[in-house]
Image (cartoon, rainbow, N blue to C red):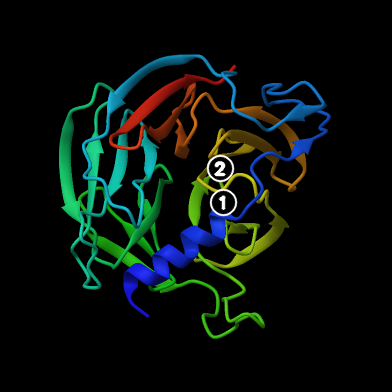
Amino acid sequence: MSLEDLVQRARNTIAKAALSITLAVTPAYSGCSDIAVPPYSCSIGANHIVVDYIPLPVMKNPYTYPEVCWNEDSLWFTEVPPPMSDAKGNNIISQLTPTGQVTSSFHFPGYLPASLVYDGEFLWVADVMASEMYKLTTQGKVVESFQFGNPGNVSSSGVPVDMLGDLAWDGEHLWNLDYVNHKMQKLTRSGEIVDSYESPGISSGGITSDGECLYFGGYYSIIAFNKNGELLGVMASPFDYALDLTFDGKYFWQIAHDGENYKLFKLDKE
């Protein structure tokens, strides 16, 4: 099976998730914004105020999408130029100012950079094709890399029981959103799985944290969980087709596209 077929199969799995399930939630918690009034239907809406947006300078690729993370005062994003290649070092990670200027770039040393997150010192990048996590300096130097999970441990359908997906950092732990097996996993910085919880199948585009809560953004919704895996609330994204998101300490930044061009939207969290 080709690289393109493998990626497309993963995307098809995500697309089968139900995107219009009504969730009754009770946002009784502290430290996180009340982002929904129960019951809330996960449908297209405009519950976030769009503060600003910038074009995301990536070439459209039908097999994969750009990912984004926040780094102190700037953004980082991935680019997989078409056509996809099964060779290492062909894909790009770039730094972007909040006003849209690319200030630096380097080639990702692995195969497919499916997610990235900054932990205050290093960039962590998930290579889903190799089931490998990379710890990188912001200049692209490999500090370490290691295999995630046990690739030989597969389900009856042949899918690995632990798969890398989207990454988040909560100030203490890494989190992996396994969107194929619908799990969110708390990790140490050595890749050890500390806890695992069921994740929402309706939101598979990305995961971020404000230090207290986890936020899942993708397709038509943003969903909040606490770090014990408990659902806190659901709100509609203002975009028909939203992808990865990150949090800068005050605002969400979420990738969306209109079928042709990617844009990075700055959203009011409250």
Figure quadrant of the C terminus: top right
Task: Quote the CA–CA distance across marks 2 and 1.
Answer: 6 Å
Q: Residues within 10 Å of mark 1 (few under 14, many from 20)?
A: some
* Residue 182 in view (yes/no): yes
Q: Circle 1 sits on which residue?
A: 173
Amino acid, disc 1: His
* Residue 128 in view (yes/no): no
Secondary structure at badge 2 equals: loop
Task: Locate residue 6: give its quadrant.
Answer: bottom left
Task: Locate residue 71: give its quadrant.
Answer: top left
Q: Which of 193 and 267 is in front in this view?
A: 267
Placement of 169 over or under 55, stated as above or below = below
Amino acid, disc 2: Asp
Percent coordinates x, y for residue 171 in the rendering: 54, 42
Percent coordinates x, y for residue 153 in the rendering: 60, 83
Q: Which mark is residue 170?
A: 2
Placement of 195 over or under 24, stated as above or below = below
Residues at badges 2 and 1 in contact (C-beta under 8 Å)?
yes
Of all residues, the one furthest to the bottom in this rendering is 152
Q: Nearer the viewer, residue 269 or 8?
A: 8
Compared across the picture, whether 144 is left or right of 193 comes to left
Compared across the picture, whether 192 is left or right of 25 comes to left
Compared across the picture, whether 104 is left or right of 72 comes to left
Q: How crowded is mark 2: few (under 14 residues within 10 Å), some or many (20 or more)?
A: some
Percent coordinates x, y for residue 123 in the rendering: 35, 50
- What residue appears at the point 35 percent right and 50 percent down from the top-left corner? 122
- What residue appears at the point 27 percent right and 63 percent down from the top-left corner? 142
Figure quadrant of the N terminus: bottom left
- What residue appears at the point 49 percent right and 31 percent down from the top-left corner? 240
Percent coordinates x, y for residue 100 in the rendering: 23, 26
Task: Locate residue 2: give its quadrant.
Answer: bottom left
Secondary structure at badge 1 equals: loop
